[in-house]
Image: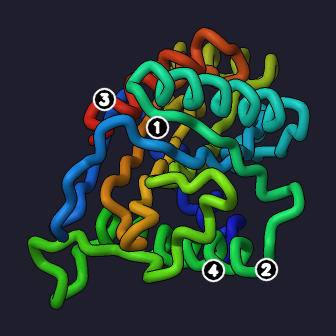
Amino acid sequence: MNKRLIGAVLAAVLMLGACATNRTRNTTNTFTPKASSRTVLVTPDVNLQVLMASGMRETRADWSEQGKDNLKRALQSELTVRGSAVTVLDPAKGLTPRQIQLLKLNDVVVNTSMQYEYFGFGLPTKKGKFDRTIGPGAQVLSGASAADYALLTRAAGSFQSGGKIAMNIAMAALGGPVQTGGTQIYLTLVDLDTGDIVWSNLASAATGGDIRNPDSASRVVQAALKDFPL
């Protein structure tokens, strides 16, 4: 499993059309949020694409960078407002081998959750349970910050080209299907003391949730963190 697979799953959901929704999961393990917590915010992994008139999608590196920066700032601001001291961890800058290993392990766990908790029927041995974990040793992700939690975010979205907008207008006039795009965000909060994923959310931001725009990204983040435990 890798980041591309998570992005592909998110993109597949977008093809169905996105509405403004939150699908949260909370750990069934013992968990009590800490007051005045410290959180490592892992720089979001974002893939934004242009939706062509043909229905094909093409990744836009500039859009993806805008979305990443806007989500990072919005998440940092929202966590700070909620009383958490925030340290940013950028996977592209000087991580230790152990930190890289833990982030890859989180990718595997995220994919499993996406497959079974969100898009499948669940695992027979996990009915009524959400006890995902990246295991002991997760504290390594905090680095020198001695953080209590780590928040990891992935986002995938598509936005219409001018040609696609014209195509959709024509299709709507004929009573045919339209394809408008949208944005999906998947967030996980890891308790670094136990390694448990104590909260996750698959949030759909709909067509108007344009994370390329700072104000819109802030609204998307506020909605996505509606049931956030910190």
Q: Is residue 11 visible?
A: no
Disc 1 crowd, CA 10 A, few/some/many (<14, 14-19, 20+)? some
Residue drawn at the location 80% of the way across and 27% of the way down: 66
Between the C-alphas of marks 1 and 2, the distance is: 39 Å
Between the C-alphas of marks 1 and 4, the distance is: 25 Å
x, y (%) of residue 162? 80, 17
Which one is closest to the eye, mark 1 or mark 4?
4
x, y (%) of residue 23? 29, 46
Disc 4: which residue:
1
Q: Give the vertical position of 230 relative to 136 (above or below).
A: above
The earlier-in-sequence mark between 1 and 4 is 4
Type of amino acid under label 4 = Met
Task: Single out the residue that lies furthest toward the left.
Answer: 128
- Number of the label disc, if any, that sits on residue 170: none
- Number of the label disc, if any, that sits on residue 226: 3
Disc 2: which residue:
97
Q: For the residue labelled by badge 2, is the local secondary structure a helix, a strand or a loop? A: helix
User: Disc 3, disc 4: CB below 8 Å?
Assistant: no
Q: Is residue 75 left or right of residue 191?
A: right
Type of amino acid under label 3 = Lys
The earlier-in-sequence mark between 1 and 2 is 1
